[in-house]
Image (cartoon, helix red, strand yellow):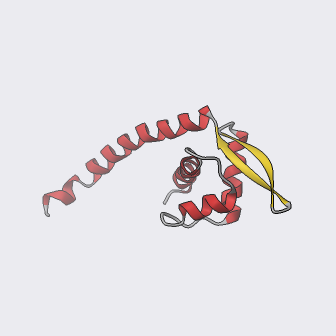
Amino acid sequence: MDIQLKRGLLDVCVLAAIKNKDSYGYQIIKEMKPYLELSESTLYTILKRLESADQLTVRSVEHDGRLRKYYHITDSGLGRIEEFKEDWKEILAIYDFITREDNRYE
């Protein structure tokens, strides 16, 4: 898969993981695990990129004597998910076009 496409998809997946509830790194990985494998290093790179793009905010909370970072989606992040949904319709149309020949022989 094209690395830029995958990067964009992973960004939206992380935003979707925190869409309904603030979460922290390990919980995000755990929630995504049934759908895709994501390493901690990849996740934290994505989280930093999304924070820099103002698509999420971070707050630290003490938990069991240590600080845990919780991530919260912003309006911009919610907008990114909606843009992705619209873009996905176009991607599906392109896929249908590319595979139209395949469907003739089924």
Q: Is residue 68 left or right of residue 28?
A: right
Q: Residue at x 72, y 50 (%)?
A: 70
Q: Residue at x 80, y 49 (%)?
A: 60
Q: Is residue 69 left or right of residue 22?
A: right
Q: Is residue 64 left or right of residue 11?
A: right
Q: Residue furthest right?
A: 65
Give the answer, above or below, for where 37 lies relative to 100.
Answer: below
Return the residue nearer the eye: 37 or 91: 37
Return the residue nearer the eye: 12 or 59: 59
Give the answer, above or below, for where 4 lies relative to 89.
Answer: below
Picture coordinates of residue 20, whole percent (x, y): 55, 44
Return the residue nearer the eye: 76 or 20: 20
> Which image quadrant for residue 103?
bottom left
Q: Residue at x 61, y 33 (%)?
A: 76
Picture coordinates of residue 50, whole percent (x, y): 67, 44
Picture coordinates of residue 23, whole percent (x, y): 65, 52
Return the residue nearer the eye: 57 or 99: 57
Q: Is residue 86 left or right of residue 45?
A: left
Picture coordinates of residue 58, whole percent (x, y): 74, 44
